[in-house]
Amino acid sequence: MSALKYVGQRLPKADALDKVTGRAVYINDLARPGMLHGKILYAAHAHALIKSLDVSKARALPGVRAVLTGQDIPEIPLGFMRDNRPLKKGKVRTRRDEIAAVAATSPDIAQEAIELIEVEYEPLPALFSPEEALAEGAPLIHELDAKGRPAKSNKLSLPWKLICGDVEEGRARARHIAQGTYRTTWISHCCLGTSGVIAEFDLNRNLTMHSITQIPYLAQNDYLEALKAMGLPSSQVRVLCQTIGGGFGSKLDTHCYEFIAILLARATGRPVKMQFSREEEFLAQATRQPATMEISQGCDAEGRLTFREVHMLLDNGGYTSWGATTPSVMMVPVSSLYRVPNVRYLAESVYTNNIYAQAMRGYGNPQATFAIESNLDQLALMAGMDPVEFRLINANQPGDQTPQGFKITTCGLSQCIEKVRQGLGWQEHQQAKARGANVGGHKARGQGLASLIHVGGGARVYRSDGHGMIMKLDDFGRLTVFTGAVEIGQGNETILRQVAAEAVGLKLEDVSIVSHDTAICPWDVGTHASRAAFISGNAAIQCAQELRRKIFALAAQQLEVEPEDLDLSQGQLLVRRSGGGEGQRLAVAEADESLPLAKVLRKAHFSSGGRMLMAETFYDPPNEMLDREFKGNLSCSYAFGASGVEVEVDTQTGQVRILKYLAAHDVGRALNPMLLEGQIYGGSLMGVGMALTEEVKLHEGRVVNGNFLDYKMLTCKDAVPITPIIVETDDPAGPYGAKGVGEPGCVPSAPAIANAIFDAVGVRIHDLPITPEKVLRALQQKKDEVCRLAQPPC
Amino acid sequence: MSALKYVGQRLPKADALDKVTGRAVYINDLARPGMLHGKILYAAHAHALIKSLDVSKARALPGVRAVLTGQDIPEIPLGFMRDNRPLKKGKVRTRRDEIAAVAATSPDIAQEAIELIEVEYEPLPALFSPEEALAEGAPLIHELDAKGRPAKSNKLSLPWKLICGDVEEGRARARHIAQGTYRTTWISHCCLGTSGVIAEFDLNRNLTMHSITQIPYLAQNDYLEALKAMGLPSSQVRVLCQTIGGGFGSKLDTHCYEFIAILLARATGRPVKMQFSREEEFLAQATRQPATMEISQGCDAEGRLTFREVHMLLDNGGYTSWGATTPSVMMVPVSSLYRVPNVRYLAESVYTNNIYAQAMRGYGNPQATFAIESNLDQLALMAGMDPVEFRLINANQPGDQTPQGFKITTCGLSQCIEKVRQGLGWQEHQQAKARGANVGGHKARGQGLASLIHVGGGARVYRSDGHGMIMKLDDFGRLTVFTGAVEIGQGNETILRQVAAEAVGLKLEDVSIVSHDTAICPWDVGTHASRAAFISGNAAIQCAQELRRKIFALAAQQLEVEPEDLDLSQGQLLVRRSGGGEGQRLAVAEADESLPLAKVLRKAHFSSGGRMLMAETFYDPPNEMLDREFKGNLSCSYAFGASGVEVEVDTQTGQVRILKYLAAHDVGRALNPMLLEGQIYGGSLMGVGMALTEEVKLHEGRVVNGNFLDYKMLTCKDAVPITPIIVETDDPAGPYGAKGVGEPGCVPSAPAIANAIFDAVGVRIHDLPITPEKVLRALQQKKDEVCRLAQPPC
């Protein structure tokens, strides 16, 4: 095999120049001829009946072209449980309920019209936590269940339940058992590009959506369903994705505002743009799913885990998005992070009158891992073991099959833990701590560590995990690659360009990527589950093989050699004339002759019976859909990693400062270390934000900090000194050995930090974010407890 | 074979609604962020030295971002003989010479800047006809020839010469010989969309051209060459065609203004739009090539043609576009219209200081056919034969091979002539005329007829006549077809949709066409030579076969039958379970089972190891490039036709009124009779304009009627009662039997009209257009001649 030319290179993102110079076209920048602007009226109550809704003043406002309410539109059921509608009718269930929408000639006029709409409500008792919603006598938020029958409670009939082995046996066998309850809260994706769409019908009633979705083909189906409901069953839908200003999972579902745009476009016969303000983005996009997690884990005398049991209560908010399926991914660490023979997991989702959640980077994994890894440190402590040693004893190993049925092929978890231990200076710190040298005045230093497992080879969460690809070669040897994958800023197009150039054997500058258009690009299930590089990379290799077969057949005929005696590298055909080819991939040195591919292609093109070369493929990875018991080999490979942090806790203020942050990831192979590190930096920082500062604050269902002043996203001023560590395990299923790495960065941050805080000051914070107030309160409680137990009490 | 579902249907154009409602996006409608506007300064003399060129005032004008002259740009040779440059330097050769260009923030500012440029010329003696340019002692317009050697004369070294058989022998054998000289003039394409382009570099120095070319892939190469000259050898070029407001051949070359846009975009770093005014379009686009044609033809006693000899003198203007190759197509009728054993043809092109010509519908054929068919009527008269009978005796027949080497497969020429004869009421008219009943007062009616031959199965004028196609099927059974063919208003996308739906076996509404983007669509040589429907139709059939093979393989596996027992029609899979399939194409009645294709596709998609279906192909027709003697089978099939007209000539005013116009065309098969008739109407009307009214008038190289008031294009008010007659010959090479038909309509109009005028009033007009003045003058000359010969003279 020739040395790799592009795979492994540190190449900047293809779209970086456009983005840093402001030339990239975001949905904000886009206008269509005759375009109208849409605005939405949201509910003024979290739970109320709509007694009357008067839009007459809004309709009369000059410049207004349409006003729609729930009464004016057909039944278009939305969301995973089909319990949502683009515009609500009769009743509101959250403060983000869309109850009317306006299309006008300018955004200002649309907003004025919104303010002219008169609504009378009859408030209902509202429920702002799962506990309240499950209480005896709580009012029903949805009167009907998913099957249209009268609902019995606010609990959703969602099936997230996993039983592996015998937890009672594991519990009985345990020498030590740690138990705890952990809570995570609403976190915003904080995409710098706010949500927006332009819906446009042509005169044949076909719809084009200028969109920023991460799932163009699934979205296309949702829109087609809506058109059917609107009486347009034979209309076609084309989804064109614009430059996306951040995805992070927020665009893995179709949203009410998109359907409102479609309805307004149909009502007016003109393109309609919806563009969220930042405040709207906080209110009416979506968040990470908050969870209350009761966990217990036990180990035997040697420190080997004997069981793990997790019970989750999830605040589903008022409606059920695809984000409600995150518990299926929470199962991944619950069942398979470390070797644990017996597992029981139950997640219950409950309707409340809060805003609702959506997929977000890690898809539940950061929440679950926060509970598992926080609790694991407690267990190690109980067992009297070093937390790092404890993790190494239990670490997953290559060849393992986990209780849920995951087949671990490559696994660099132990290496990741070792490298983080080294990088932290763990031993030195422990020795210093033993001497009390980690404390100076009111500041104490501590170290903590947490691991992760995530899908790294696609994930069959839909019935297809597939990806189509077309390659078109021109007669100058330039290649165009058509991919259904969506670039959401992670650099997938750059990676794909590298892989395609490598796999076909062309120069990088001769490869172009075409994407973001459902009419042109073959089907892909969407950019999620850290799958884009893995899946599109494998598709590119598969398609390249077909293209190379055609190239070599053509060239062999022209050059009068056997196809086996040919190779192609960086656009040069290598020819072995001496015969005896033992397979492809000649080295340049072995070639008896070398000529530009373009020459062969032009000759083939400009002959009678001329030919030009294209190839197409559909790659569907050999992973499995989970069965009814949620078992099966969900992914073709699994990503592992460990993050280690050193913090300094100020015991006077409760402030936590991160001094070191090491993030070691088993990435299979680094296709582009620069972009890979970018994923690790970004993921880690997102994880730190989740751990320490970020929370969408709700007061009676209303977002009270929906802006970047009050919502504390980390900025470059808060940046943490992150050291990415790349562990390569050369995964046999991955393109050139690579695994997915988009999400893992953020997964272990919170527990690593929580563990480090405990290491520093001996208090464990169970609910995120770990604010100074919570640290101070915990320190005070600990002090009170110590005092209470002291003889004499202090 | 199942009955055809869509082929043969009268379906309106897919883009008709967009165009009639003003929603189609023309280049005029398009703006790009940060776009500048370019304007060009043209020469003030037809032939002069540029003594000085001062752009300082233009550069100083606020809003001006770049001013370029020939001094500021690299050497970018353009045109068929590479004798042209985007901006001229040192010397101007025509009044359309581009000598400076401005990019500014608005078109008005750009125009003001143009007017601030100061130029001093030293006029040179100018040459406004080939005769003047060939005269002894004429100054040289180009000092160097194509090879860079000192030029010896103004004659171009172009090789248009054809010798078939022995013309001297044919001449000797002739009983009658008719001789004459015919002239055609400059005609404008009169595209309603004026020329325009936006050139845009991205930050990686790749170029996107928002263009209206008919040859996106050849244009891409021209632009790449220009970028090389500009020091950007590794830049890529993407050509995106916008809606084209008329092509007719005018966009078969790249033009100076396009390269000026590129140079200005590079100089400013911003997108630059050039958009011609109507006056500019007349001056600086291009025209049909004017020709002076000496012809002689002879026949034997039975009226069989024994020879044809044609000598053409062509005004090449100041530079040589691809339009200079029209003499190669003029050869088609010269050598092959009617059976003529001995042919000699010589075409000489001469530089003048006039504007220059470009390809135009028929590519020289209308000029040559004007001479041949006018002269043929004279020959029939000399031979004392009825002109229709004379043509039938000599008509081409299926199975013929013409002297130039064209293999006539299907040929409906005789049928076309017969149908026109019938439709005109030829016999009745001749009888009436014999009685003098065709004359009433100062008005006389006459009938005339002319035939045509044209390429109808592609034309190998470039080294490839090929066409690539990709088909992508989604799992709802919807098909996207990627074609390199350019829709120039002729309806090709509608036709292709019909053919693809038919050939794959889908519903029409489930087929979409993607075109007009070199990045996405496979290569095609361009929309010319009436080839689009023929070539893209054949490519679609070829690609459909591949796609059907994949569909049947997939379905056979799922349904547990043999692929041979399956058929697909309108999206339904037909299954024969009773076995014994004798080939594909079951009729619905024969099927034992029928199920939606979508069902099979979705099952295949949503299984592990899932698949989605695509297919790609490259179709290159089996036609031949002409050899060095200009012989070979240029096209896979040949189109034939005959037009017949009845005119009324006013002998007091010279006015010619068309009473009947019959256009019979051998089209192989009418894929869509409605669009086919549209081509015949449009072509015929263009031919009538050429015959009677259209002429770009030049005075010393300056266009003096460059607007729609003074240039007499026919409008709907002048519309002629055209009766299209479709003759189907089911061509074996064509898609469903079809031949090309885009150009033929305009070919025989002028001679048919000239012949009808002669029939009416006995005068023959030899030069186009046949204006009332020319008719009156000829009538007066005839009268004078009659008087002169009368005894006694009157």
Image (tube, coloured by chain):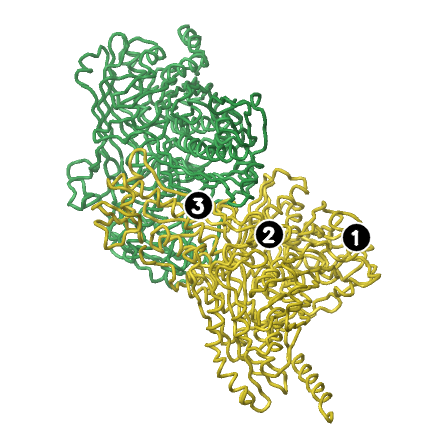
Chain colours: A yellow, B green
Q: Which marked residue is nearer to the observer: mark 2 or mark 3?
A: 2
| 2 or 3: tag closer to the N-terminus | 3
Judge by depth and name the residue closer to the eye, A419 or A381. A381
Residue A400 location in percent, x, y?
Answer: 51, 60
Disc 3 marks which amino acid?
Ile
Inspect the image, locate mark 1, and give the three-letter code of the amino acid beneath it: Ala
Q: Which of marks 1 and 2 precedes in the sequence?
A: 1
Residue A239 point in image, percent of width and height: 55, 48
Is disc 3 on the same chain as disc 2?
A: yes
Distance in Å between CA atoms under marks 2 and 1: 28 Å
The local crowd at label 3, few if under 14, some if 14 to 19, many if 20 or more residues have their Cα within 10 Å, is: many
The residue at which mark 3 appears reads as A470
Distance from Cα at disc 3 to Cα at disc 1: 48 Å
Subunit of mark 2? A
Q: Quadrant of the N terminus of chain A?
A: bottom left
Tell if the residue under mark 3 belongs to the same chain as the one under mark 1.
yes
Q: Are marks 2 and 3 in contact (CB under 8 Å)?
A: no
- The x, y position of residue B271, in whole percent, is 42, 55
Residue type for callout 2? Leu
Considering the numbered disc 2 on the image, is that residue within a helix, a strand or a loop?
Answer: loop
* Secondary structure under the numbered disc 3 in the rendered image: strand
Q: Chain of mark 3?
A: A
Q: Residues within 10 Å of mark 2 (few under 14, many from 20)?
A: some
Element type where label 1 sits in the image: loop
Q: Is residue B444 visible?
A: no
* CA gap, disc 2 and disc 3: 30 Å
In the rendered image, which quarter contains the C terminus of chain A? bottom right
| Count of numbered tags | 3
Nearer the observer, disc 2 or disc 1?
2
Residue named by callout 1: A151
Q: Which residue is mark 2?
A: A626
